[in-house]
Amino acid sequence: MNGDALLQNVVNIFIIAIILEASIMAIFSVSALKNLESNRAVESTRDILIIIVAFFLCYKVDQLRVFLRTGLNVPKIIDIAISTLVMARMTLFIRAIMARLKGED
């Protein structure tokens, strides 16, 4: 297994996760959506939107697949699914860090 390629793929996904979280934050910070309370429905909608966008990004952009060029023979759809989940989790991690920096709960 090529660890350097795996690490580079994870770093690429992390960078895209930062961009994805920034774009989702921009969508949900539009003044028309600011009046919505931050309840479970809004959070669930946000999480589903992140997973859908992450899936299509990983499906269309081969560079965002975790096991690309690592030497592991993983089926493409499983690689895409794992990459989607990694990107979604990194996006949620970035959201938690941003919330702490802002002082939100």
Image (spheres, rainbow, N blue to C red):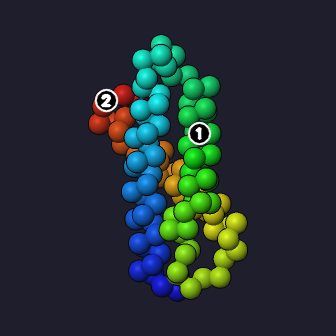
Per the rendering, the mark at residue 49 is 1
Residue 78 can be seen in this image: yes
Q: Earlier in the sequence, mark 1 or mark 2?
A: 1
Classify 10 Å Cα crowding around label 1: few (below 14), some (14-19), many (20 and above): some
Identify whether 88 is placed above or below 98. Answer: below
Closer to us: 26 or 88: 26
Where residue 38 sits: x, y (%)?
A: 51, 22
Residue at image location 35% in from the left, 39% down from the top = 98
Residue 85 can be seen in this image: no
Give the left or right position of residue 87, taking residue 29 as reference: right
Identify whether 1 is placed above or below 35. Answer: below
Classify 10 Å Cα crowding around label 2: few (below 14), some (14-19), many (20 and above): few
Residue at image location 29% in from the left, 36% down from the top = 101
Where residue 70 sits: x, y (%)?
A: 52, 81
Q: List the single residue furthest toward the top.
A: 35
Per the rendering, the mark at residue 103 is 2
Mark nearer the viewer, 1 or 2: 1
* SS under mark 2: loop
Which amino acid, by three-letter code, is at mark 2?
A: Gly
Per the rendering, the mark at residue 35 is none
Where residue 23 sits: x, y (%)?
A: 43, 39
Residue at image location 57% in from the left, 26% down from the top = 42
Quadrant housing the C terminus: top left
How far apart are the two marked residues, 1 and 2, measured between alpha carbons? Answer: 24 Å
Which amino acid, by three-letter code, is at mark 1?
A: Leu
